[in-house]
Image (cartoon, helix red, strand yellow):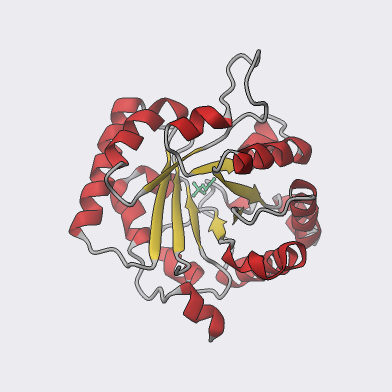
């Protein structure tokens, strides 16, 4: 099976169910009007309250859907939390785990994120594991150490390669500041090596996405880097046109051929 680019919209805490419906309809419409490259998979991650409705709209399309979080216990007295089996029952494919907003605002630890990745995989959901350094960590030259720590703690002991990694420098999220393609490529290559060490050859199927102020006008430069396999898009995914302009980025060749060249 061909490895494809993966472009994921992270809607965060935006869009009511009816607004979500409008957005998802526009995305479906734009996809049918512009021929989208066969090398690209599209996914959206609306808020929990919109998942059921959006999944219904997407059921006869090849656009995938995911959640933005889950809880690591199977079920029980955890008021306000959502389990993996609840998400799976909605026919979701992905779940974002360990986003920097969850780490910073809700104090999620690598240990909790590890548990979340485990339960997601055990429930046949594909985790989109987010990692990334703060500005302070980058400026003190600790970027690669931070990434290595996050990845090694979260993936410790795991063997399942049904996984997506999103490299999201915290200082680039929602700020309009993007990592240069060279900065991003360097970290992506490093992540690729870490995955190779952990999973061996099987690691080659794990897509590594870039996230942090990706927009239609910088997407091509980022997505054509050798180790960038797609994007996790926040702000630009809230407008159907800009999201689909990223999806329709020109010049994306099949990932497998790119790796061999
Ligand atoms: P942004 O968000 O594109 O608005 O920077 C990306 C993300 O947080 O996933």
- Percent position (x, y) of residue 217? 39, 64
- Percent position (x, y) of residue 76? 64, 16
Q: Quadrant of residue 57?
A: top left
Q: Residue at x 54, y 48 (%)?
A: 175
Rendered view: 88 above or below 145 = above
Front residue of 223/153: it is 153
Front residue of 175/154: it is 154
Horizontal side of 116 relative to 140 (left or right) equals: left
Q: In which quarter of the image is residue 104?
A: top right
Front residue of 171/230: it is 230
Q: How many labels does the image show?
A: 0
Is residue 174 among what the camera can see?
yes
Image quadrant in which the N terminus is located: bottom left
Q: Which residue is drawn at 63% across and 48% down?
A: 130
Q: Which residue is drawn at 55% across and 79% down?
A: 259
Horizontal side of 32 relative to 172 (left or right) equals: left
Is residue 98 among what the camera can see?
no
Rendered view: 22 above or below 30 = above
Q: Which residue lies furthest to the bottom in this view?
A: 261
- Percent position (x, y) of residue 180? 57, 67
Q: Quadrant of residue 98?
A: top right
- Percent position (x, y) of residue 227? 58, 71
Rendered view: 151 above or below 66 = below
């Amino acid at each position: 099976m061909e490895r494809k680019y993966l472009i994921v919209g992270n809607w965060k805490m935006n869009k009511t169910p009816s607004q979500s419906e409008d957005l998802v309809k526009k995305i479906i419409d734009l996809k049918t009007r512009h021929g989208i490259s066969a090398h690209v998979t599209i996914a959206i991650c609306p808020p929990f309250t919109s998942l059921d409705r959006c999944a219904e709209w997407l059921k006869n399309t090849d656009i995938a859907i995911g959640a933005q979080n889950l809880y690591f216990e199977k079920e029980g007295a955890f008021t306000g939390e959502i389990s993996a089996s609840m998400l799976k029952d909605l026919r979701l494919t992905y779940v974002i785990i360990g986003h920097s907003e969850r780490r910073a605002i809700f104090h999620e630890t690598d240990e909790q994120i590890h548990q979340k990745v485990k339960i997601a995989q055990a429930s046949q959901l594909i985790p989109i594991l987010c990692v990334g350094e703060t500005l302070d960590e980058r400026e003190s030259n600790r970027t690669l150490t931070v990434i290595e720590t996050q990845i090694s703690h979260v993936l410790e002991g795991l063997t399942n390669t049904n996984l997506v990694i999103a490299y999201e420098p915290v200082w680039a999220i929602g700020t309009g500041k993007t990592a240069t393609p060279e900065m991003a490529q360097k970290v992506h290559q490093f992540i690729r090596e870490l995955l190779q060490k952990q999973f061996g050859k099987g690691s080659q199927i794990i897509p590594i996405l870039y996230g942090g102020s990706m927009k239609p006008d910088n997407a091509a430069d980022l997505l054509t880097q050798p180790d960038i396999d797609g994007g996790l898009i926040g702000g630009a995914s809230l407008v159907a046109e800009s999201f689909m302009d990223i999806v329709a980025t020109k010049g994306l060749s099949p990932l497998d051929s790119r790796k061999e060249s």
